[in-house]
Image: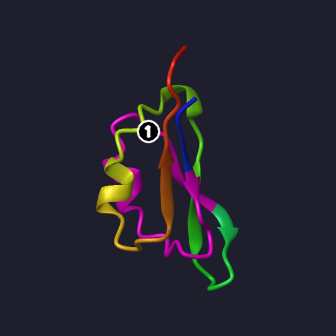
Amino acid sequence: MNYVEVHCDECKGCAVCVSSCPHGCLEIGDSLNAKGYPYVRFIKQMRCSACGLCFTVCPEPAALSVYTSKEE
């Protein structure tokens, strides 16, 4: 399964990744990180294509990691 790992303490909740995801796999959550920002949550694993758009547009270089799995 493809997925996005959110490093919550690096996220500043700008939601640029949320609006850029073509499959709607990300949302801003209700919880706050250690810096006091609401951070992004990965919500729809089955729809993620691991395109990397969220990673590319994120202004925080360590906030997101995108992983893909090879189908057998």
Q: Quadrant of residue 36?
A: bottom right
Q: How many numbered marks does the figure carry?
A: 1
Q: Quadrant of residue 8?
A: bottom right
Determine the secondary structure under disc 1: loop
Q: Residue at x 43, y 39 (%)?
A: 24
> Amino acid type of disc 1?
Gly
Residue 26, compared with residue 62, is above or below; it is above
Q: Residue at x 59, y 70 (%)?
A: 38
Q: Residue 7 in the image: state x and y as whole percent.
A: 59, 65
Q: Residue furthest top?
A: 72
For mark 1, what is the residue?
24
Q: Residue 32 in the image: state x and y as whole percent.
A: 67, 73
24 vs 8, nearest the viewer: 8
**61 with respect to 7 (left or right):** left
Range of residues picked out in magenta = 5-29
Q: Quadrant of residue 15?
A: bottom left
